[in-house]
Amino acid sequence: MAPPCRSFPASDLPLAVQVGLNGKLRKTDDGRRIDLVKDCELFEFVQYECLVTRPEVRNSPVECWPVQRLFRRCQDKKGKFTVETTAWEGATAAAAATSTKTELQQDKSVPSFGKQNHSVEISKSV
């Protein structure tokens, strides 16, 4: 089981990321504070939320919808760490990432996963 973590508003993420799990300040190799936008690469993780249309009926259809989550992969003096930034990135970054994914899926060489149960995609956002 993962250790408990403290809750804070998404707007506090740039400040919260400065402190590691050990309570010590994180710094880049050159001694600067971590800048989520400049120092951390943006990644997208797509999960699917599914609903059985009529659970009381055997072989009932299952409908699934993609749920996009955004992460930043950062590095401090001690190594890499990943931070979920979905709420902090806001609708603008989510829309841009979705737009990029849609463009890629229109290209026939990129597989489209569509509505599937238990599917996960991880991709680097541009």
Image: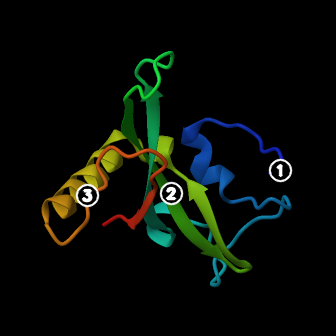
Three-letter amino acid code at disc 2?
Phe
In the rendered view, tell whether residue 17 sits above or below residue 53: below
In contact (CB < 8 Å): disc 2 and disc 1 = no
Where is mark 3, residue-wise? 112
The quadrant of the rendering that contains the C terminus is bottom left
Q: Position of residue 66 (x, y in %)?
A: 37, 42
Q: How far apart are labels 3 and 2 at the CA level?
A: 22 Å
- Quarter of the image for residue 112 reads bottom left
SS state under label 1: loop
Quick one: label 3 or label 2, which is nearer the N terminus?
2
Where is mark 1, residue-wise? 1
Nearer the observer, 105 or 87: 105
Three-letter amino acid code at disc 3?
Ser
Q: How far apart are labels 2 and 1 at the CA level?
A: 21 Å
Quick one: label 3 or label 1, which is nearer the N terminus?
1
Q: Residue furthest bottom?
A: 30
SS state under label 2: strand
